[in-house]
Image (cartoon, helix red, strand yellow):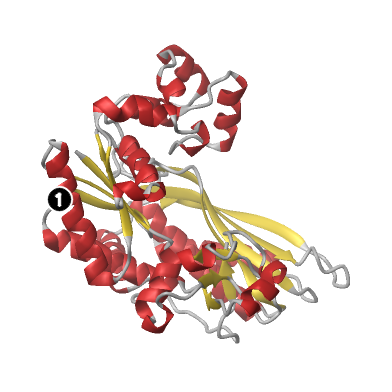
Amino acid sequence: MFLHIDCNSYFASCEVATRPGLEGKPVVVANDNKAGGGVILALTPEAKALGLKRGIPLFKVRNLIRLNHVVICPVDHKKYRRISRQIMEAVQQQAIVLDFVQYSVDEFFGSLPVEEPDEVRHYARMVKEMITNTTGIPVSCGCSQSYTLAKVATHYAKRYKGYDGICVLTPESRQKALSMLDIADVWGIGRKHRKKLQERGILTAQQFANCDEKLVESLFSITGVRTWRELKGIPCIDLHRPEQQRSIMQSRTFVYMTDRYDDLEQYVRTFATTCAAHLRQQHGVCRSVTVFLATNRHRDDLAQYRNSGSVKLPSPTADTPTLIKAALAALKELYREGFMYKQSGVILTDISEEEGMQLDLFTEPEDERRRKLMQVADALNRRFGDDTVSLGSRTHSSHDNPAEEE
């Protein structure tokens, strides 16, 4: 039986878990800044009860926040990644969940070696309580015959108190559950495909599952076909081998605008490092590195500049120093003095499988020691934090909190 674990209001739960004085209080996590901007990213049940919601700009609810003594916590991605790793380690040490894998910072998948619903619920309860007792993070669990159906089960576990945080979706209850689920809430159905299905009168997950396979193949890529099969209880998603992304991007909108080349160099260096790690995680290599810069388009009083540039690599690679060097070369060509920059980013494209990469006639394969060094660095960063090991020199920004993640 497949298992899906989803952390409840994860960012807010992390703040409450690490600051006991916040327990029972209305708390929101926001990308707040001194200028008063930012939006709500996560919130506790107490904050939701006041009518606050994700995505609301802070300036629109300042009075409500002040009158109800709502605590605003700045977003802390390092803390959230650290606690996510603690959850991973705790579940692995419990040795109940098989094939356990992290899908995102607050979502995990695995399987339980039992099929009978009561037994499944019993073991899921053990895992759920262990996570909360170990880390203080409340979670919801869904169990079913495929990863996609397990995620459907979690959808109901989070929304109906009667499940007490655990929903086991059996073949007998599947049709009713999918009939009540909007097609927009199905994992793997993007906005473009959702609209296409709705135009054809396919409004629920069950209606989609009932579609003819030929129709699904004509409307979707292989990802959509896999989703359709998974809704029918046919497991066909391999989360241990991530889907190959066509591009990998890392970017930031800065809290403080900057005209300093050194600041931009630090950002681009960090973005390239993160992109390289993601590329290796999916066993890929790339041949093109793009960097973009942009000023604040909302500041009509300032000179405007937006541009991007790409560097083609002589051979496909996932080597961090090589990708950093290419990104910095692109930045050097893009940078113009006299502008206050608000955003920058790095994009890796022309991605292919590592095993099947084609080398130029006069290009030697990357040194095996270099590859092993990358693997060791990735492992250490996953375990102890993203900045534990860095490859290549880094400069330091002049700001303590220079950027916000998009």
Q: Is residue 13 rendered to the left or right of residue 197?
A: left
**In x, y percent, where is residue 339?**
78, 73
Q: Nearer the viewer, residue 249 or 112?
A: 112
**In x, y percent, where is residue 290?**
59, 55
How crowded pointer 1 is (Cα within 10 Å; few <14, some 14-19, many 20+) is rated as some
Whether residue 322 is visible to the viewer of this picture, yes or no, is: no
Q: Is residue 284 rendered to the left or right of residue 169?
A: right
Residue 360, by quadrant, is top left
Which of the image's four quarters has the C terminus? bottom right
Which residue lies most toward the front here? Answer: 162
The residue that mark 1 highlights is 123
Residue 77, by quadrant, is bottom left
**In x, y percent, where is residue 24?**
42, 74
Q: How many marks?
A: 1
Which residue lies most toward the right here? Answer: 301
Q: Nearer the viewer, residue 218 or 318?
A: 218
Residue visible at 31% across and 64% down in the picture:
374
- Kind of element beneath mark 1: helix
Residue visible at 12% across and 43% down in the picture:
119
**In x, y percent, where is residue 97?**
16, 51
Which of the image's four quarters has the N terminus? top left
Q: Amino acid at mark 1?
A: Tyr
Residue visible at 32% across and 53% down in the picture:
140
Where 87 sits versus 311, above or below? below
Residue visible at 44% across and 63% down in the picture:
274
Whether residue 147 is visible to the viewer of this picture, yes or no, is: yes
Q: Nearer the viewer, residue 99 or 249?
A: 99
